[in-house]
Image (cartoon, rainbow, N blue to C red):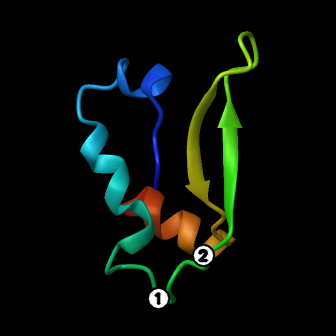
Amino acid sequence: MPLYQPLIRLLKCPDLFDAIDRMPALSTPVGELMFEVFNPSTGELLAELPDMRIAETRAAIDRA
């Protein structure tokens, strides 16, 4: 899951984001679909995140 420099420089532990879409607690593998997150004030690309369904998102939040 790619994070980009405008976001990485603000995080204490950016490596923790790499595991969200590969968590063993998720009942099904996260698909290949991704979405981009932009800084609304600058338009900079911050991250590309997995497009998870509700169950996978809840599991990721519970494991966080």
> In terms of image quadrants, where is residue 5?
top left
In the image, 54: left or right of 46? right
Q: Which residue is mark 2?
A: 55
Image coordinates of residue 29 in percent, x first then y, are 50, 85
Q: Is residue 29 above or below residue 50?
A: below
Asked which secondary structure carries label 2, the reply is helix
Question: Which residue ends up furthest to the bottom in the rendered image?
Answer: 28
- Looking at the image, residue 41 lies above or below residue 25: above
Residue depicted at x 66% and y 64%:
51
The label shown at residue 27 is 1
Q: Amino acid at mark 2?
A: Ala
Q: What kind of element bears circle 1?
A: loop
Q: How many marks?
A: 2
- In primary-sequence order, the first of circles 2 and 1 is 1
Q: Position of residue 46 (x, y in %)?
A: 57, 31
Asked if the residues shown at circle 2 and circle 1 are in contact, with their CB atoms under 8 angstroms apart, the answer is yes
Residue 64 appears anywhere in the view? no
Q: Amino acid at mark 1?
A: Ser
User: Looking at the image, is 50 positioned above or below residue 49?
Assistant: below
Residue 9 position (above or below residue 2)? above
Residue drawn at point x = 45 percent, y = 67 percent: 21
Q: Is residue 37 left or right of residue 5?
A: right
Mark drawn on residue 53: none
Instruction: Indicate left or right for 23 with 35 as reference.
Output: left
